[in-house]
Amino acid sequence: MHATLPFLPYIVGGLAVTILASLVTFACAVAIGLAATLWMTTGHPAAGPIVRAYVAIFRSLPELLCIFLVYYGCEIALQKAAVSFGFRPIPISPFLAVTVAIGVQFGAYSVQIFSDAHRSINPGLFEAAHALGLSPRKVTTRVAIPLILQAAIPGLSNLFSVMLKVSALASVIGLEEVTRRAKIVAGSTREPFAAYAVAVVCFLVIAAAAALLQARLERSFRSTREA
Amino acid sequence: MTIWRKRLQAAAILLGCIIAGTPVSAQQQKYVVGMDAAYPPFVSVNSDGQMIGFEIDFMNALCAEIKIQCEIQNVPYDGIFAALEAGKIDVIAGGNNITDERKQKYLMPGPYLRGPLAFIVPVSSTIDGSKESLKGKTVGTVGGSVQEKYMREQIGRETTVKLYDSMDAAVLDLDAGRVDAVLSEELQALPGYIQAKPDTYKLAGKSIYDPAYMGQGKGLMVRKTDASLAENLQKGIDAMIANGKLAEFSKKWFGKAVPAR
Amino acid sequence: MKDSEVAPVILEARGITKSFGGHEALRGVDLAAHRGDVVAVIGPSGSGKSTFLRCLNFLEKPSGGQVILDGEIFAAADFSGRSHQHRGRLIKLRRRVGMVFQSFNLWPHRTALGNVMEGLTQVLNMPASEAKERAQELLNKVGLASHAGHYPAQLSGGQQQRVAIARTLATEPEVLLFDEPTSALDPELVGEVLSVIQALAREGRTMLVVTHEIGFARDVATKVVFMADGAVQERGSPEDVLRQSQSPTLRAFLSRFRQER
């Protein structure tokens, strides 16, 4: 334990990366899920098949595979392209790879959360907006999106807590989040238990903070539902 | 097929442009050196998160010696070979043993260190490293390593070999009593475990200097397509052996001048 | 007054048909509302009266026929595709024809005031401060000035429907469509909503009211339309339809209705 103590700030510092990566990934997943759900509600003939295929594909892929695919696969594809078209290849950072890979993958889960949320909303609320003379775009931004988001809070909270944990997978491609730093310290100090224990506490703390936030959000929305 | 490839390339370019904004054409020679900072004293981090160790001093001096710009990155060992092949890094360092299999896939400038093997055992253990003392015992070591080879070929079937993906995992099981000894490289074992916890561990018997298992020493790894880089690195290593810098670093980090060849 | 003078026709439906799959819900419904008319549409459930009302502002796309608002023709065929031009016309039609729903359909994420303001700021593009003032006036008009800050979930059904009426009035539509405005209410709350609708009738607003409240049709309406099986069976003054008609279907409907109430 003695050897690990000086490393505390270093491991805990990885929290910033964990949280940032989770938030960016989450935003990415939410944006994809919301966009796909809204696209489906337009009744565009291609929307249903494309979104369903997307969900089916990404729900069945292991997260780690997606990360590898983006981090190594895209880098190689980029390099090939760079050679034939004569530009300097752009390195894909671990952060970018993780947010893209997990964002796109969890987008598939969020599509389901959002389309369930959408189904749970009384269609009369949209009709009322149309009947008032709101443009379809305003019906979407003023009525559909707020209501869908509100109905999706419990599902999204679950998704976020899973995402926090999945972000630890980024350690395998060297993103210096909590898990990776704990592993580095474990190797450096030969005190793996202490190092990983610190990481465990870190994750428990953010999970608790996220749960608090969820409870707070739900409470503030519930007040609009009940007298 | 070619049409497909063209399309893929076009898609990749599009992706690249999205990610980077604009293509850059200026070519700067900067090499990325990857190593996993979990193997003291070769490489680890200090409490500020800075990478330190023999390999860091060595690589910095080597890059300076051959006048190339290097950036050292902390890359998890699990993905370090994929990173080399994907071009994310140009050199793998961190204390890898030169083996024939590896040489078939990569160019391996070196050796720059050549150390013996040694058994780590609890201080109370009666194991002395001989075949007899290991009969019926369980020995842990890293899978795919020269240590594993040594166990298979020299110790034989009467000793159970348990394989781990890292030395730490093997030593954890030594703590837990699941294995009776861990076969390690002495260079790694001494400062990493023995000096760190002299009340817990000791080296069993004599170090194993059999050249067949000391391997071919430690080398860097470079893609086969980067022949000129590998050649340069080799020249730099030769120069550092000649001018005594390597010996200086090994004294600093291993407590003694370890032979490079 | 309304009966003796002939006001111009403001809203007219011509040959509206609607089929859901194989089922013909509307079989060519004609109806004309003059300015100031209060048309009560009655009939058994499944007679197509709500569907007809929803066809007038194209919440339900008619399969055939025309809606003519103040001389402008909106043909069912115009709205079958996704043309932007027609979508724009549709929005204009809806601004001029307001609708109040059976289940209120207030937006749960906005307060009573916010619900009423929506049309002012988003449809009429009124600045927020002015819209707030106007919305407050409208809430005052339906007797809910003190409930401006309440969310729909904090209001009774009758209060919600009055807010919904204020929301519809905000955009100052020339014609108001009421789709069974009191059917979802507890009996003791029906009165407060009916009296608001009655007050609007006194202002001379043009209204089409699908209702089961025969008393309301008799006392407030200027015209009564009786629908059954997707077609208009009887039409005329309340006296003609509710008292004088000899139609057996209508008589059966009215008698059953009286028993129920």
Image (cartoon, grey):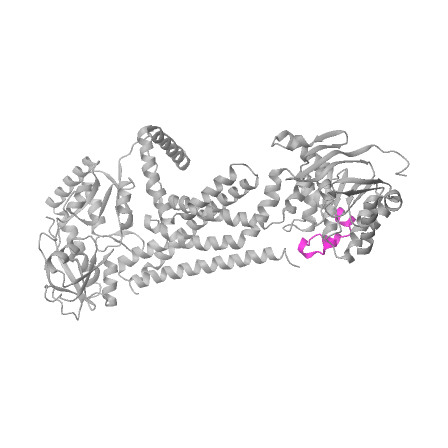
Whether A221 is drawn above or below C77: the answer is below
Q: Where does the image place residue C138, in percent across and percent down from the top left?
A: 76, 46
Q: Where does the image place residue A107, in percent across and percent down from the top left?
A: 46, 46
Location of residue A199 (image quadrant): bottom left
Instruction: Name the one closer to the observer, A199 or C228.
Output: C228
Location of residue C172 (image quadrant): top right
Q: Is residue C158 magenta?
A: yes
Q: Is residue A206 magenta?
A: no
Q: Where does the image place residue B189, in percent across and percent down from the top left?
A: 18, 59
Residue under the point 48% across and 57% down: A210
Instruction: Name the one closer to the observer, C232 or C153.
Output: C232
Instruction: Name the one closer to the observer, B140 or A217.
Output: B140
In the image, farthest residue toward the front: C248
In the image, farthest residue toward the bottom: B124
In the image, taking residue C254 as reference, residue A92 lies left or right, namely: left
| Residue B255 visible here | no
Q: Where does the image place residue B164, in percent across and percent down from the top left?
A: 24, 57
| Residue B211 visible here | yes
Residue under the point 49% across and 42% down: A51
In the image, taking residue B21 as reference, residue A174 lies left or right, namely: left
Position of the C terminus of chain A by quadrant? bottom right
In the image, taking residue C159 as reference, residue B217 lies left or right, namely: left
Position of the N terminus of chain A by quadrant? bottom left
Start and end of the magenta stretch?
C138-159
Location of residue B227 (image quadrant): top left
Q: How many marks?
A: 0
Instruction: Name the one closer to the observer, A167 or C226.
Output: C226
Residue under the point 58% across and 48% down: A119
